[in-house]
Image: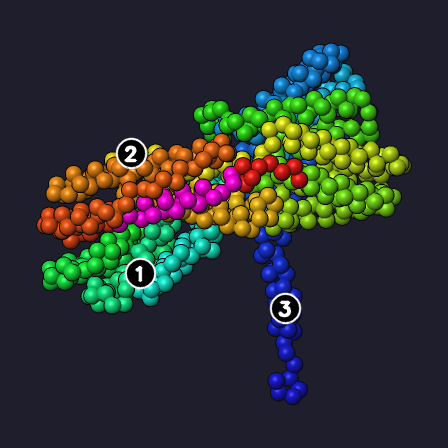
Amino acid sequence: MPRGLSMPSGIFSRRIFRAAWEPLDSFLADPAVRNGIKFALAGTIALFFALLIRLDEPTWAVTTAFVLSTPKFVGAIAEKTVLRIVGAFCGAVIGYLITGSLQQNPVLFLAAMGGLVATTTALYGGTLAPYGFRQCGYTATLVATQGLMNPAFSWHVGLARCEEICLGIIVTMIVTTTVWPRYARKEFSDEVRGTLLILGRLFRQRADGFLSGGAGEVPDVLGTIGGRLAKLRKMIRLGSMESTGFRRRKPRVDAVVAQLGVLSTSLSNFGRTLPAESRLREYIEAEITALHEAMAKTIEALADPAADDASRRASLDRTADCLRSYESRLLAFRLDGLGENLPVDESLEHAGYALSVHEIFDSLSELATLLPAVDDGQAESFPLIRFEKFTLPDGGWIRAGIRGGLAVAAGLLLLDWLHPPGGDLLVVGTYLFTAFSLENTDRKGDLGVFNVLVCTVLACIVFFLFLLVAAPMMSSYAVLNILLGTSLFFTGYLLEKGVIRSFATLVSLLMCVILVGLNAQRPVGFQDIAGPVMCLVLAATLSALMRRLIWPALPQNELRDRLSELLGLLEETASSPDRSLPIPERARVALAAADAQVLVGVLEGKTLTREEAEQLRTYIHCLARLGGHLMFSTGGDRMPPEAADLYRDHRSRLLLSISRQLHAQRIAIEKPGTVVDTAPLPDARSWTPQCRVLIRGAGLDVMTNSACLGLLYRHEQSAIAADLASRTAAGIPWKDHLADRIL
């Protein structure tokens, strides 16, 4: 700048503002930071208005804000607003009636409360207004707990509960819909595109290897795809529970995940390699290279959020043109008489490759049709509540309901016996920790619950010491709001980061209840602090005992169920070779295998050593490969009459033997100790060469000929995968791998 001139003050101010704003903007762009801020705003504003209008129990307004802030999506608030009010009203009335009429008869009182909690918890796992049932059971438990010592007072508890809930609902609705609102379809769409990017990377690796001779498996990428498919399924479940708008599009999003599963299976079946000295390679290498590049760009276009429907369709059309060029070149290769002396193995493997690229193209075409429907109107207003058709909850939620009912009964007995200060936390905490353990997102279930108990006790000790120091300062509302806002911010932040899970979230919730309850406008004694904290420890201890002694939900059991489901699907497919599998059933094979891989990762380092986990991964991978070949080799008979009899006879023998092996493996998993059948399968290579000669002499067009040869290749690969799976299963000590561990 020339001497004597100064920078205009406006420009200087803007630069200072920009320099200060950019780091702040980067900080606020973090979804975890945003979630923490929303938690803190909802809780502190709810507490402010509860104190301003002098409601009896400000803690309940904070609790409502906390619970309603936990779901991510805007649609959840619209639905939970009504269901929470209705559920709270019904729970307050039922809790008052049970307490007022049965409190003098302990057996009937405990039976009624346990039955109510068991029923509402089980129905929370159903489809009809699940959150309303949860709120009903929770409110009834709180009313019964606080009215236990004075049954006539329970009506006041129910009324106060409804007032505080309404305040918490209004505050949370305003915060959630105005401060960085999140929508289920938007985040689902982003996750789908992330999965497509990984699939595109996998495709490029397999495609490059097909011509370079290194098209082996890519276990790390395949494992990542399995985890992402499992995450997408979880997002569908949670999004459907939380958002009515998302639930209306559930068939579409289910179809998207199904196609992703089928696409990943097709990529796994991609041809091994095309030898460098092959005459076929010399003839069609340029067309194959162009086809691979077009398919990779199509996958990238589908994954690109900036791409519109027209650009996706244009990319898909270019892929279709490349596929037709490849088919034309393959026809020319045959018409020139160059395929007569092609080695049998090379001919069959390339036919399998041709089937795979057609399957991949079909999946991409379906995804191009489905994705615009999923993306359309991502930001929507509140949908009207639409109750789903009632269906019974699954066995897991029924068992969770019974455990929750027993936990509440046990908590009420302890409360009546000990009469501790803050005793409502003992019953409510036991109920929440026990009844809703199935909501854990880390798939660990009740595994290591006593380890979690130790961590909870240590956290409570630290919290207790903190309260001893902070309690005198909490007579100031400013200090109270700072402490509450800070704790809520870190809870929301860590919850979004995945550092804490459902159990830790509930512990944090009850700690916030204790914190707000110690608003020291009166002298706070040692017992006022020690009592609630001790009740929290007792609740966690009682819950841990209930969860481990009564129907523990363990990932070992879930892994057994997923493997049994996968083997059952494959067995059914092998036993019905003439039935063409629809897309959802094909996707179930891929998704069951993906779930099993995720569960093995959960168990690794806990109940499984690294070597044992790798052994299970190898087995699951063999089953996934077998499923990929079986799924695409069933259906209508495409063989020419000249080869049909030979093909059907040997195919039936092979698939019957595979079905028997799969059945034996399923029994060995469901009943550990059963011997796995490792009898050798019929050698597919003993009849496929003869069948190949008959097919080539039938005068079929080039693509029909390739499809028939591809079926032979698939049956050969099915036999190889089934044999390897059988031998691997025979070496797995299922009783040890799926055993329960207390810690």
Q: Position of residue 558 (x, y in %)?
A: 52, 36
Residue bearing the label numbered 1: 273
- 742 is higher (above) or lower (below) than 213: above
Residue highlighted by disc 3: 19
Give the distance between the C-alpha atoms of the residues marked 3 and 2, in whole angstroms.
68 Å
Q: Earlier in the sequence, mark 3 or mark 1?
A: 3
Secondary structure mostly seen in the magenta stretch: helix
Pinpoint residue 541: horizontal percent, then vertical percent. Answer: 73, 33
Q: Give the residue displayed 61% in from the left and 34% down from the top.
A: 437
Relative to 695, does residue 401 appear above or below in the rendering? above
- Residue 484 or 402: which is nearer the viewer? 402
Cα–Cα gap, marks 3 and 1: 54 Å
Looking at the image, which residue is at 61% across and 64% down? 22
Callout 1: 10 Å neighbours few (<14), some, many (20+)? Answer: many
Closer to viewer: mark 3 or mark 2: 2
Name the image quarter holding the N terminus: bottom right
Query: Which residue occupies the foreground of this view, 484 or 416?
Result: 416
